[in-house]
Amino acid sequence: MEAEKTMKKMMFALIILLLAVSGCSNAASTKEKASKKLQIVTTFYPMYYFTEKVAGDLADVELLIPNGVEPHDWEPSTKDMAKIQDADVFIYNSQYFETWTEKVLKSVKNDELKVVEASDGIELMDALETEEEDDHEHASSKDPHVWLSPVLAQQEVKTIAKALEQADPAHKEQYQQNADALNSQLVELDQLYKETIDQAKTKEFVTQHAAFGYLANQYGLTQIPIAGLSPDVEPTLRKLSELTEMTKEKNVKVIYFEEMTSAKVAKTLAKEIGAKTEVLNPLEGLTKEEQDQGLDYIGVMEKNLEALKLTIMN
Ligand SMILES: [Zn+2]
């Protein structure tokens, strides 16, 4: 009697085990059959946008950090890590932006994974040491916001294209063509910025956080940031009163703010000096409204230029 029970239990366990095993292998083989496409995981919106344009329909491109989520302080969950581990290619902007990559990539067990730092080869500017960032443990020493320069963005596109060509050599020409098409759009965007900013009467603009250094450099403008390289690092009271004095003196008419983080300080400053507030999107993600309007990287960059005109044309 006892022996029979034990036997039954063992059979049951065996069946469950067999089901599980066959279920797994079935799932794996269907997955293999269904998609010979490259599986690419990208971190935040511009990385996703550049990669999707270069990949066309040759790859499945996933966005890890959802739009609407501020990526500066984002950290991956175990589920996110599994996505990276299962991918063929993983694309991020910079170790100074996605600061979690080093640790995560060490724990990923996938020797085949191609890892791409899109800003590779671009000389990064030193981060300005500001007093409120001194005691900030994660304060980075380099400015990672290269994607906001339409010229440096082209370099990131080339780096991404090269990586996809290496991961999938059979489609090399297609990746090159797609990258060229995107880069010619970025050349046009650069022209538009150049032509517009050539007419600038005012060169300085006040931003919520120091995201626009490369863009400013590219076109001879100067960014006056309220917060540091990361939007969550708020200015000290002393810094804020200096900013109030300075912007009053310079007769600043517009204070730019962002929609994905609290714009409280920017709005307070604007009120204090009687300036207007306008959105300048650092493209660390798209808002729901921007997605509903069908805006993409190029569209937002064009909108940003329109917003900048309100300062520089006065
Ligand atoms: Zn930023």
Image (cartoon, rainbow, N blue to C red):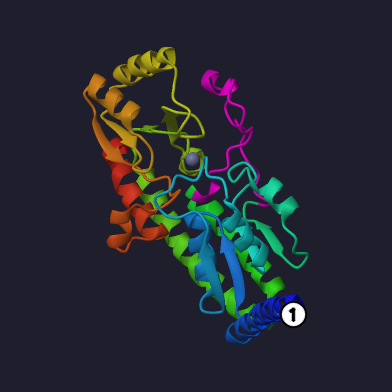
Q: Report the quarter where the C terminus lies.
A: top left
**Residue that carries the numbered disc 1 in the rendered image:** 7
Report which quarter residue 155 is drawn in: bottom right
Does residue 314 appear in the picture of this structure? no
Q: Secondary structure at mark 1?
A: helix
Residue at the far front in the pictured view: 1
Where is 171 relative to 93, above or below? below
Where is 112 relative to 304, above or below? below
Does residue 176 appear in the picture of this structure? yes
Q: Was residue 138 drawn as part of the magenta stretch in this picture?
A: yes
Looking at the picture, how far across and down is residue 49, in whole percent? 48, 62
Front-most of 151 and 255? 255
Front-most of 80 and 181? 80
Q: What's the magenta region?
A: 120-147
Looking at the picture, how far across and down is residue 63, in whole percent? 50, 61
Q: Residue at x 47, y 43 (%)?
A: 215
- The kind of residue on which mark 1 rests is Met
Q: Residue at x 45, y 48 (%)?
A: 284
Q: Majority secondary structure of the magenta segment?
A: loop
Looking at the picture, how far across and down is residue 301, in whole percent? 38, 53
